[in-house]
Amino acid sequence: MFARLKEEIGVVFERDPAARNMWEVITCYPGFHAMLVHRLSHRLWNAGLKWLARFLSHLGRWLTGIEIHPGAQIGRRFFIDHGMGVVIGETSEIGDDCTLYHGVTLGGTSWNKGKRHPTLGQGVVIGAGAKVLGPIVIGAGAKIGSNAVVVKAVPPGATAIGIPARLVESDDPQGRFAAYAVSRDANDPVAQAIHELIDHGAEADRRIDHILEELQRLRREVETERTESASLKKVSRILD
């Protein structure tokens, strides 16, 4: 028990550089408190004490701002940073070494009984404000960008961003991940397509302007030639 508790505290130091000492983690980290409450409420839930488990979970929500259904299955070294507004549904399954930031929802898309919440593989990171909905699988090592809405499975190691979420390639060779926003340099195919359309439109406008300028120049030349021709005709009549 104490080894497991020490492991939970060690995760905070590993993933939050703001953590200074053990006493601060024990007293001031709502994600740590929420997990302690969930470990106990989950045991009560599995023991058949459903109401007591839900009531304890409700108290944990009131104290931490983090709502974790006692039926959710959560692996080891799970870390919730900041925590406020996190919601984890009843049939959610979370693997070892996963990280969630504030405002994350692991929700359902159906009122039917049975599996209706996401499954997260080992080492998944979900950025602030993201919504992962339905009985989908987020593969091991996958990353979900800030405020993304994910309704389809994400392959292992992939990065998903946007609404609805789409897969992108990370251009960071060190594999770093921005939990609050995806880097503006991310290789987003939709953004690239939009930029290409904008560039194409600008080039088309430039060509049209050039054509109009040429037409105006030709018009001026024609008018000049007509004027000169008329002048020559007048001179010719006078001389005759």
Image (cartoon, rainbow, N blue to C red):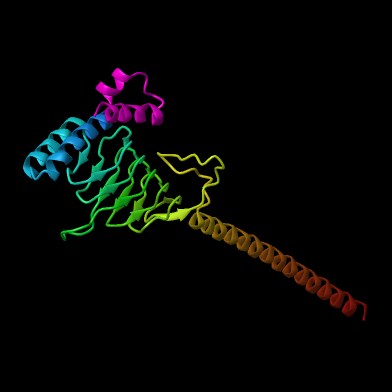
Prevalent SS, magenta region: helix
Give the residue at x 54% y 45%.
Answer: 185
Quadrant for residue 86, please give it: top left
Give the residue at x 22% y 57%.
Answer: 115
Quadrant for residue 98, please give it: top left
Quadrant for residue 101, please give it: top left
Give the residue at x 19% y 49%.
Answer: 90
Residue 3, position in %: x, y? 29, 28
Q: Compare residues 85 and 56 and report the one nearer the observer.
A: 56
Q: Compare residues 83 and 205 and report the one nearer the observer.
A: 83
| Number of marks in the rendered image | 0
Side of 89 where 56 appears, left or right: left
Residue 14, position in %: x, y? 40, 29
Give the residue at x 17% y 43%.
Answer: 70
Q: Compare residues 117 and 94 and report the one nearer the observer.
A: 94
Q: Does 21 lie within the magenta span? A: yes
Residue furthest out toward the bottom: 240
Which quadrant of the rendered structure holds the C terminus?
Answer: bottom right
Q: Which residues are magenta?
A: 1-29
* Vertical position of residue 218 compared to residue 191: above or below: below
* Vertical position of residue 240 compared to residue 36: above or below: below
Q: Compare residues 78 and 101 and report the one nearer the observer.
A: 78
* Vertical position of residue 54 compared to residue 9: above or below: below
Which quadrant of the rendered structure holds the N terminus?
Answer: top left
Residue 174, position in %: x, y? 54, 39
Residue 6, position in %: x, y? 30, 26
Q: Does 220 lie within the magenta span? A: no
